């Protein structure tokens, strides 16, 4: 019996050796031939695993694009706010910090997070927290609850998705010299009303404390703390046609407490159009206008127009490059920005191909009678022109350039050098959210 068992074992080994070449040749054939030898139950499992891998990859790509479009870098189930890592302005100095929020990998239903930063020069601690509840599966409609204690630039306002996170327009904050300490609680509902129209309803309660005398004031007017409520509506209409057009509108109503009473209504609007004239020429036009009326305090005036803190600075589109920060204020204003871009070396895939941008800007502002004697405005018209040699140096998606801007007209300075602004340009090319 033992001999019979040994013979059978030897026969099996011989058969295995003889069939090895045919098995090997089948395994090195096409993928279908390999799958043919997988049992049906195992084949279904492999297909399921492959489907789950594809779904995970597509979700990871979607989450990455969505987060980056808003200025956040995904890292697992949390995202890091890139704009909070390194910041700077002339009042606070360097402002390192971190902003974190959960993303769709943790939950498709909500996101929560916060931020902390330290103002090294002014020695301020800034922090905040928020919670976002998505109202639709598409995540285009959501409810926001937020709190923040932070230093914000004086006399500024924001449109709904008005500035792309990687646009050089964000460098405007580097020139800030006048800030207000703001403690604010807010609630907002954002809704995608149609394919082209998005809206936001909001309410906030804020305490505002000016940190220094505003540069546009002509005397040492006492700037007191303000406390009050504000409710508003923000709208954004955008087309994705060849001639891209975007229109923003804000309407806000504010009211103070009994200690420092105030009441106002403000209306802000902005229109932007980009027209490709040819394969190498593109024209961009932006018109911004605003008005605030009521029983106002100096902190309510618009003043964030200029970015010339020094002779040399950082290029920031759609601002007055030769005007000092908060040099002028206005209770109503209108500004026109014109930019014509020439892409050189269009037919060359590599090499030196600078982008040359010609720009001109002009605006006019007015003050309500209560501020005529104590504040400066630009009712005679403010004008400047410049040329920007962009993309002089390129490395993958980042490029650097140099621009020159000159101030002229009724508010020109006596010394020529005081009318000049030299800007170092940084462009980051990425996918637009729009």
Image (tube, helix red, strand yellow):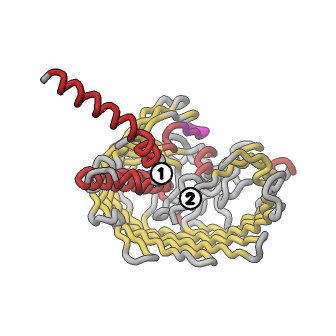
Mark 2: few/some/many CA within 10 Å (<14, 14-19, 20+): few
x 44%, y 37%: residue: 98
Task: Give the quadrant of residue 132.
Answer: bottom left
The residue under label 1 is: 29
Kindly check if marks 2 and 1 are in contact, taking CB atoms under 8 A apart as contact. Answer: no
- Residue 64 position within the rendered picture, expressed as x and y whole percent measured from the top left: 45, 51
x 42%, y 40%: residue: 75
Residue 228 appears left or right of 432: left
- Residue 80 position within the rendered picture, expressed as x and y whole percent measured from the top left: 44, 42
Q: Residue 163, labelled with which disc? A: none
- Residue 362 position within the rendered picture, expressed as x and y whole percent measured from the top left: 72, 68
* Between discs 2 and 1, the one toward the N terminus: 1
The residue under label 2 is: 431
x 19%, y 22%: residue: 3
Q: Residue furthest right?
A: 416
Local SS, label 1: loop
Local SS, label 2: loop
Compared with 123, 232 (above or below) is below
Give the residues drawn in magenta, as a range. Answer: 86-91
Q: Choose mark 2 or mark 1, whichever is in front.
A: 1
Can residue 301 be seen in this snapshot?
yes
Q: Nearer the viewer, residue 158 or 86?
A: 86
């Amino acid at each position: 019996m033992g001999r019979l068992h040994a013979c059978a074992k030897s026969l099996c080994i011989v058969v295995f050796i003889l069939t090895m070449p045919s098995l090997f040749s089948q395994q090195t054939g096409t993928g279908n031939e390999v799958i043919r030898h997988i049992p049906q139950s195992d084949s279904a499992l492999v297909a399921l695993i492959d489907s789950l891998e594809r779904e995970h990859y597509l979700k990871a790509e979607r989450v990455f694009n969505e987060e980056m479009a808003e200025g956040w870098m995904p890292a697992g189930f949390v995202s890091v706010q890139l704009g909070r890592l390194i910041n700077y302005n002339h009042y606070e100095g360097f402002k390192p910090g971190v902003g974190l929020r959960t993303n769709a990998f943790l939950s498709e239903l909500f996101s929560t997070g916060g931020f902390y930063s330290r103002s090294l020069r002014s020695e301020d601690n800034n922090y905040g927290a928020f919670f976002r509840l998505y109202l639709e599966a598409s995540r285009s409609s959501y409810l926001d609850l937020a709190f923040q204690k932070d230093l914000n630039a004086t006399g500024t306002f924001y449109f709904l998705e008005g500035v792309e996170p990687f646009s050089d327009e964000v460098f405007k904050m580097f020139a800030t010299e006048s800030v207000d300490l703001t403690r604010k609680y807010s609630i907002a509902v954002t809704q995608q009303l149609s394919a082209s129209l998005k809206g936001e309803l909001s309410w906030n309660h804020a305490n505002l404390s000016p940190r220094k005398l505003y540069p546009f004031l002509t005397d040492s007017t006492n700037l007191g703390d303000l406390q009050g409520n504000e409710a508003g509506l923000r709208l954004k209409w955008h087309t994705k046609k060849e001639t891209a057009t975007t229109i923003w509108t804000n309407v806000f109503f504010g009211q103070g407490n009994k200690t420092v009473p105030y009441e106002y209504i403000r209306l802000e609007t902005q229109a932007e159009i980009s027209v490709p004239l040819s394969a190498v020429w593109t024209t961009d036009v932006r018109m911004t206008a605003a008005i605030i009326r009521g029983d106002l305090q100096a902190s309510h005036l618009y003043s964030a127009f200029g970015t010339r803190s020094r002779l040399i600075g950082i290029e920031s589109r759609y601002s007055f490059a030769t005007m000092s920060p908060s040099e002028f204020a206005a209770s109503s204003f209108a500004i026109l920005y014109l930019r014509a871009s020439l892409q050189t070396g269009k037919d060359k895939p590599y090499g030196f191909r600078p982008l040359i941008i010609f720009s001109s800007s002009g605006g006019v502002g007015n003050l309500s009678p209560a501020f005529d004697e104590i504040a400066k405005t630009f009712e005679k018209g403010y004008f400047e022109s410049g040329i920007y040699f962009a993309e002089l140096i390129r490395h993958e998606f980042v490029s650097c350039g140099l621009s020159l801007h000159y101030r002229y007209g009724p508010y020109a300075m006596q010394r020529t050098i005081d009318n000049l602004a030299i800007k170092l340009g940084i462009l980051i090319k990425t996918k637009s959210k729009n």
